[in-house]
Amino acid sequence: MTANNTDTTGVLARAAAILDAVEASPQTTSDLANRLGLSASTVYRLVGDMAKHSMLRRGDGGLLHPGDRFGTSSLVDLSVPILRRVREDTGESAQLWVVRGSNRLCLVSEDSRQELRASLPAGALLPLGAGSAGHVLAGDFDADEESRERGWWESRSERTPGLTSVSAPVRRDGRIVAAVCVAGPIERVPTTAGFLWGQAVCDAASEIEQSLAVRPEW
């Protein structure tokens, strides 16, 4: 039991205590160790695990804030109408992906109305680093000058043979927090996915970013 009557026995209790502390005000790992009466190594390990799972995020000066996971419901609510419009404009499936540990999670999925389509349900979990959204969220996008200049990443038969996709990053305070993706069968793409859908995903990502900027919970 610590001086502020926070029970920090057990991993879940310690994680909850960390979340309570950073929700009250941004904290460094040293602040948390002192406040909770835990060793610096214990807090460092817990913070690393929590950040990996989007429960915490690091800001300027090493300050810790509640992570993007806790704005998921708001992100879904504001993204659904935008992605539905993207689906109608492109005729193909539109999705919104976020990072979950070493994977990417589909938060929103609006399937194409065509019988032959790229289809993944909301809640689908895929590895990072494969597919256009995977590359955007894995950090490959920001590391690639050409992708940054054009604003999107294209994938062709990389994760699933016969499918192509293009994705654009959604940023919050300069960080990539999600990826907008449009995907469809290669046979319906006479040029490239980027040429057909690049502007649509960029516009959708920008609209989501603007909506996030006025959400206090984000």
Image (spheres, rainbow, N blue to C red):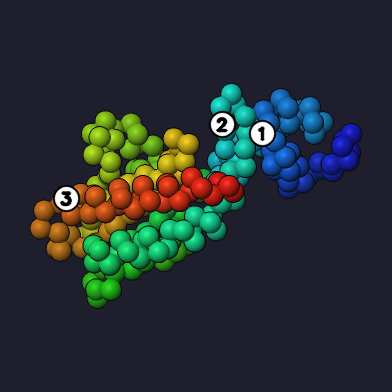
Instruction: Name the side, left or right, on which 53 lies relative to 31.
Output: left
Identify which residue is drawn at 35% across, 65% down: 84
Instruction: Return the x and y of residue 213 as percentages of the image width and height.
Output: 48, 45
Vertical placement of 3 versus 99: above or below? Answer: above
Distance CA(mark 2)–CA(mark 3): 35 Å
Q: Which residue is mark 3?
A: 195
Q: Which residue is mark 1?
A: 26
Q: Which mark is residue 156?
A: none
19 or 45: which is nearer to us?
A: 19
120 or 159: which is nearer to us?
A: 120
Q: Tell me the element at label 1.
A: loop
Identify which residue is drawn at 28% across, 44% down: 152
Distance CA(mark 1)–CA(mark 3): 43 Å
Instruction: Return the x and y of residue 31 as percentages of the image width and height.
Output: 73, 27
Task: Place residue 32 in its image quadrant.
Answer: top right
Q: Which residue is mark 2?
A: 59
Identify which residue is drawn at 42% across, 47% down: 210
Identify which residue is drawn at 55% across, 58% down: 73
